[in-house]
Every structure is written in C-alpha cells, then in structure tokens.
C-alpha cells in the first residue's frame, strides 16, 4: 500500500488537448506546434499509465477488505477515491449509530479493577473516536466522566478535587489517580476489591415461610439431635433400625 496509496490524494492526469491545424497555419508552424506538444503527450502517457496501475491495485486492496454481502451494494467506479466517497455516503447512518453507542458506553462506563491507568486511557480512546464525527468531548468534561466512573474507594479523592480551584489536564489526572490507587492498595494490604456483590438476597415474608413449612415433611419440622430416630424420637438409633417403626409398618 505504501507504493500505491498516493492515488487517494492524486487525481488522474489530464490528457493534453489534441492539436488541430489552423486554416491559415503554415506547415512550418504546424510542425513546430507538434514538436512542442510531443513532450506533453509523452509525459501524460507515462503518468497516466503509472496512475492507472496504482489505482487498480489500491482499488483491489480496498474491495478485499469489504464483506462480500456489502460489496455488491456499492456502485462501481473507476477511481478509488470516488469509490471511498460512495462508501462514506452509504454508511453515514451507520456512523450516527456508532456515535450513539460510543456516547452511551462512555457515560455508563464503570471501573471494576485491572488498573486505573488502562481504564482512563480506554475512556479517552472512546472520546477520541467521537472527534471525527464533530462530537468532540472537552478534556474538562472527560475528567468528570472519569471521576463518575470510579468506585466509592475514590470518593474522598474526588471530593478534594471538587473543592479545589485547580483543574487537571489528562496527564495529571492519570498520574494522580495511579498514585491514589497505590495508596488505597497499601492501606488495604496490597489489594482492592472493586467488584460488588450483586447476588439477590432472598427476602421472604413470614406468610411465605409459613406456607413453605406446611409443605415440608413432618420429620423436618422439629430439631433433630444427633443419633435421634425420626420415628420414635429416641436417641441412640436411626429410623432404619427402629423396632416400633418396623412393627407399625408391618401392621399397615
């Protein structure tokens, strides 16, 4: 691509205007005009051949990166620069959808460990992708988005920043938060647990507990001691060894 990508910004060479002999033009003047025009024609032939070959290779590379299901919906054209413009016009709506997804992800992003530096850089990368779409986010706003994405372990640090008159740039934000994370790790024995317990607690009303106890077997509704028979309630043997149970079962 390094040898052919120049055709993306270089238009196709323009063919020189064909000479036409004037009615009152002498043969000597006509031959002189042809001699003067010959280098222009030769230069055009060389440049046009070079441009056409590079354009054909570059166009093949671009088409090779497109899914076959999408490739058929893009109108054909000779110049690769025009082909890219047609792709851009077809996917304008997709760019808007992608921008909406980026904004939603950026606003809802939360830090759950793995290094606060990587977390901040990941959010910065998402914000940078919005700039070509004319949806750039200022550094001050991004700083507050980063702070909102951090867990409660950083609350005191955020409060100190909010009451301070100083504003941080992005480099200072990363440096200070990395230092604060290391301080929190040292105070917690070298590790921080950012993952919250999202397990749902089973809150049952007394009524539901009573209904559940009605469906339990009779032997589960009293406290059972160790080595206690579930039939005669005596300690020292189990139900399978209980003689009264065998007698009652034989009577049935």
Image (spheres, grey):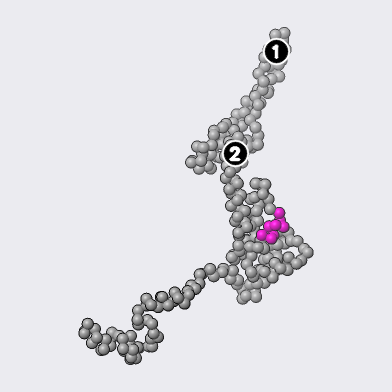
> In the picture, which quadrant includes the N terminus?
top right
Q: Which mark is residue 204?
A: none
Q: Is residue 130 visible?
A: yes
Q: Quadrant of residue 2?
A: top right
Find the residue positioned furthest to the right.
Answer: 165
Which residue is the site of mark 1? 30
Report the residue at 61% width, 76% height from top. Answer: 189
**Drawn side of residue 222 relative to residue 113, left or right:** left
**Magenta-tinted stretch:** 138-145
Reply above or below: 23 against 233.
Answer: above
Find the residue positioned furthest to the front.
Answer: 207
Residue 66, how many percent across, how many down?
A: 53, 42
Which residue is the site of mark 2? 89
Question: Do labels 2 and 1 touch, CB within 8 Å?
Answer: no
Report the residue at 63% width, 37% height from top. Answer: 8
Q: In terms of secondary structure, what is the magenta stretch mainly?
A: helix
Residue 131, how many percent across, how many down?
A: 67, 49
Report the residue at 59% width, 65% height from top. Answer: 112
- The kind of secondary structure element at disc 1 is helix
Report the residue at 71% width, 54% height from top. Answer: 138
Reply above or below: 212 against 92.
Answer: below
First in sequence, mark 2 or 1: give its number: 1
**Drawn side of residue 230 relative to residue 37, left or right:** left
Residue 58, how many percent across, how many down?
A: 57, 37
């Amino acid at each position: 691509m390094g040898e052919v990508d120049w055709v993306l910004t270089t238009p196709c060479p323009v063919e020189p205007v064909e000479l036409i002999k004037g009615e009152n033009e002498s043969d000597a003047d006509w031959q002189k005009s042809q001699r003067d025009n010959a280098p222009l024609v030769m230069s055009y032939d060389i440049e046009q051949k070079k441009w056409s070959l590079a354009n054909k290779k570059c166009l093949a590379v671009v088409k090779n990166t497109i899914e076959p299901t999408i490739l058929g919906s893009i109108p054909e054209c000779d110049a690769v620069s025009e082909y890219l413009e047609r792709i851009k016009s077809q996917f304008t709506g997709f760019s808007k959808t992608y921008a909406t997804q980026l904004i939603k992800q950026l606003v809802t992003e939360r830090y759950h460990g793995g290094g606060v530096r990587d977390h901040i850089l990941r959010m910065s990368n998402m914000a940078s992708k919005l700039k070509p779409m004319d949806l750039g986010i200022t550094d001050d706003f991004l700083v507050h988005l980063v702070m909102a994405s951090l867990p409660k372990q950083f609350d005191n640090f955020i409060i100190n920043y909010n009451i301070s008159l100083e504003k941080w740039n992005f480099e200072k934000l990363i440096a200070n938060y990395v230092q604060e994370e290391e301080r929190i790790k040292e105070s917690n024995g070298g590790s921080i647990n950012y993952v919250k317990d999202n397990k749902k607690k089973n809150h049952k009303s007394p009524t539901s507990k009573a209904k559940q106890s009605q469906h339990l077997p009779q032997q589960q509704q009293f406290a059972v001691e160790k080595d206690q028979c579930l039939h005669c309630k005596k300690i020292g043997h189990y139900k399978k060894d209980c003689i009264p149970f065998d007698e009652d079962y034989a009577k049935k």
